[in-house]
Image (spheres, rainbow, N blue to C red):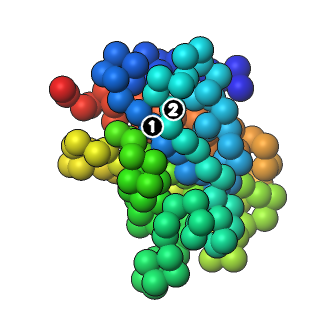
């Protein structure tokens, strides 16, 4: 958490200054993204909600993403991360959505992705042109290290997007 807190603090300052909000959906980061954002004093001013979407059941109930929405999309992919960020943002009525989905290890996932694979996405309510999705491959199988790397990458993606947003 010590390495995540400084970037979360910077994100919090931007969101508070703009009076904007964030909703988070994460999978293989296991809640570390939300924990980092909530570690900043005054988080209730910008943090709307967060969910660990680790199963198909959680995806359906926490994000309103149904099976038919996934017909051409697989989990742990950029298209899924983008959809997850969008639906999480919409479901929470937040200004920003942040999503992470991957394989933390020590083995890969059922889709053939190696441990250390994750996809991250950011979704903006007011500037959809800033929406982005990316893939991170750590080439590591250590679960805890990957979870921390995934959370750091997600927070960095959010921070970069926030900084590129002009109001």
Count of residue discs: 2
Which mark, residue 140?
none
Question: Residue tagged by mark 1?
Answer: 22
Q: Is residue 150 left or right of residue 64?
A: right
Q: Is residue 20 above or below residue 120?
A: above
The image quadrant where one finds the N terminus is top right
Give coordinates of residue 90: x percent, y percent.
Answer: 38, 53
**Residue 25 visible to the viewer:** yes
Give coordinates of residue 141: x percent, y percent.
Answer: 77, 54
Give coordinates of residue 133: x percent, y percent.
Answer: 40, 54
Question: Nearest the camera: 27 or 21?
Answer: 21
Mark toward the start of the polypeptide (1 vs 2):
1
Q: Is residue 160 above or below residue 136?
A: above
Q: CA distance from mark 1 to mark 2?
A: 5 Å
Which residue is painted at 40% across and 19% down in the image? 16
Give coordinates of residue 40: x percent, y percent.
Answer: 59, 18
Which residue is painted at 39% across and 42% down in the image? 94
Which residue is painted at 68% across and 38% down in the image? 32
**Residue 117 visible to the viewer:** no
Which residue is painted at 81% across and 58% down in the image? 106
Q: Contact, CB < 8 Å: mark 1 with mark 2?
A: yes
Mark 1: give few (<14), some (14-19) or many (20+) Cα within 10 Å: many
Question: Nearest the camera: 128 or 148?
Answer: 128
The image quadrant where one finds the C terminus is top left
Which mark, residue 47?
2
Q: Is residue 126 left or right of residue 17?
A: left
**Kind of element beneath mark 1:** strand
């Amino acid at each position: 958490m010590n390495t995540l807190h400084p970037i979360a603090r910077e994100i919090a300052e931007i969101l508070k200054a703009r009076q904007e909000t964030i909703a988070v959906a994460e999978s293989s980061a296991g809640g570390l993204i939300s924990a980092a954002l909530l570690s900043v004093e005054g988080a209730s001013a910008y943090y709307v909600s967060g969910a660990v979407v680790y199963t198909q059941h959680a995806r359906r109930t926490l994000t309103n993403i149904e099976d038919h929405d996934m017909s051409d999309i697989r989990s742990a992919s950029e298209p899924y991360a983008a959809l997850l960020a969008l639906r999480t943002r919409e479901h929470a009525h937040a200004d920003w959505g942040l999503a992470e989905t991957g394989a933390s290890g020590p083995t890969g996932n059922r889709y053939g992705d190696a441990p250390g694979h994750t996809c991250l996405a950011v979704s903006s309510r007011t500037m959809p042109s800033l929406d982005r999705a990316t893939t991170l491959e750590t080439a590591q199988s250590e679960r805890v290290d990957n979870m921390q790397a995934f959370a750091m990458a997600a927070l960095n993606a959010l921070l970069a997007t926030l900084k590129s947003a002009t109001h």
